Image: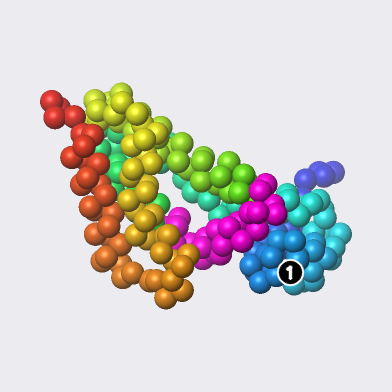
Amino acid sequence: MSTEPSAYHRRVAEEKRTAILKAATDLFLASGYDGTSLAKIADAAGVSKATLFKQFSTKAALFDAIVTEAWQIDEPDSSPDLPTDDLRAGLTAIGHRYVELLTRPGMTALFRIVIAELPRFPELGEAQFSRGKMPYFESVSRYLIAAREAGAAKVDDADLAATQFLGMIANFVFWPALLLTDWAPERPAIEQAVEEAVHTMVARYQRRDT
């Protein structure tokens, strides 16, 4: 007799996990990380404390899961549709994926939680950096290295180039939203921001002898 959970039980477990992550994010934002207990999260998620503890034994583990899920996206350097021999096309695709990531529901709230609680809980900043932002940043850097190896880019410092590219997009799409509650640029403005960032990168890093 198989001990593997059925498809139904896997689906129920995933639904409960999703409810827990959403309830935790909402409570962390409303009451702060320190002011939110696992018991409150279980109650808000509509699950038992035993169910919550089975999936997340500590509040820190729960926050790590929130960060990891918020940043989950196909890695740019591993996606087959990103041409390493066409820097403009590759960066355009990466740029739009980054916009999709930064504008996900809850992403701004996640940053606000970290910023608000950082003085007392520096480990939250470490989780956001090491489990969220850094893996994505490194994937963009790897794409630029792959483009260099394919002969499409002349990039001496891929990390610096990735910082420049992502920064140009985030400075328009994301960071104002942390301070301006009504910041909601129209789609054409976002697309122009990505296009200009790509144009700047191509002008700086595309090989001219290809």
> Is residue 78 at least partly visible in the picture?
yes
Q: Is residue 46 above or below residue 8?
A: below
Q: Which residues are magenta?
A: 100-123
Question: In which quadrant will I find the N terminus?
Answer: top right
Q: Is residue 135 left or right of residue 151?
A: right
Q: Is residue 35 above or below residue 131?
A: below
Indicate yes or no whether the magenta region holds residue 126: no
Specify the color scheme: rainbow
Q: Is residue 2 left or right of residue 176?
A: right
Picture coordinates of residue 54, whole percent (x, y) = 82, 53
Q: For residue 33, what is the image quadrant? A: bottom right
Amino acid tagged 1: Ala
Q: Nearer the viewer, residue 200 or 148?
A: 200
> Is residue 88 at least partly visible in the picture?
no
Q: Is residue 38 left or right of residue 105?
A: right
Q: Residue at x 33, y 69 (%)?
A: 185
Q: Is residue 115 left or right of residue 13?
A: left
Q: Residue at x 63, y 54 (%)?
A: 118
Residue extending furthest toward the left: 209
Picture coordinates of residue 51, whole percent (x, y) = 82, 59
Is most of the magenta stretch helix, strand or loop? helix
Residue extending furthest toward the front: 119
Q: Residue at x 81, y 44 (%)?
A: 2
Q: For residue 131, what is the image quadrant? A: top right
The residue tagged 1 is 45
